[in-house]
Image (tube, rainbow, N blue to C red):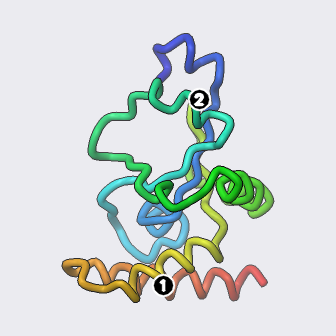
Amino acid sequence: MGRNDWLIALAPIRLISAGGFLAVLYLKNRESMGDVDYLIDPAFAEDKRKLHFPNGWINEAMAILVTKKAQEALFKLSGKQDITLFIGEDLEILAAPIEWALERKLRRIYAAQRDGMADLDLSDAVALLKQLRARK
């Protein structure tokens, strides 16, 4: 991203993450993840195709069921929560609201049939609950 003049003008680009990236970097309940699940700041939503993130390490699949209004609310809550997972020259990744991340995990656990991922989701959910308790 650092070589693109258009992106430099917008930097830092803000994302929120609620999946394995949160579990590895903040909750520290596991050592690895497959990719970074993210939502992009709605201010960049129209321009996200220009970001050209490399395939395989980042995905926006969690955005499919999140309306623009909900994304705006999530970004506001993430800012108030103030958990930064990564900050670089051009990119900042905040933790999604812990309550929302927990809700996502519980829905995934309920859906089951996920080729062994349910154990990771359960571990993440327990770590999220501990974090909620510690923050309250």
Task: Give residue 106's mark.
Answer: 1
Label total for image: 2
Relative depth, front residue between 87 and 121? 121
* Left or right, residue 98 beside residue 55: right
**Quarter assignment of residue 5:** top right
Q: Is residue 48 above or below residue 113?
A: above
Q: Residues within 10 Å of mark 2 (few under 14, many from 20)?
A: few
Relative depth, front residue between 62 and 37? 62
Q: Residue at x 30, y 59 (%)?
A: 34
Q: Amino acid at mark 2?
A: Glu
Q: Residue at x 46, y 82 (%)?
A: 107
The residue to which callout 2 is attached is: 89
Q: Amino acid at mark 1?
A: Leu
Q: Residue at x 60, y 41 (%)?
A: 92
Q: Nearer the viewer, mark 2 or mark 1?
A: 1
Task: Give residue 4's mark.
Answer: none
**Quarter assignment of residue 101:** bottom right
From the top left corner, tell me how far across and down residue 90 is, in percent.
Answer: 57, 29
- Do residues under tags 2 and 1 come within 8 Å of each other at their CB atoms? no
Kindly give the residue lying farthest to the left in the view shown: 115
From the top left corner, tell me how far across and down residue 42 is, in percent.
Answer: 65, 42
Going from the N terminus, do you reach mark 2 or mark 1 first? 2
Q: Residue at x 25, y 78 (%)?
A: 114
From the top left corner, tell me how far across and down residue 136 is, in percent.
Answer: 78, 84
Q: Is residue 78 above or below residue 112?
A: above
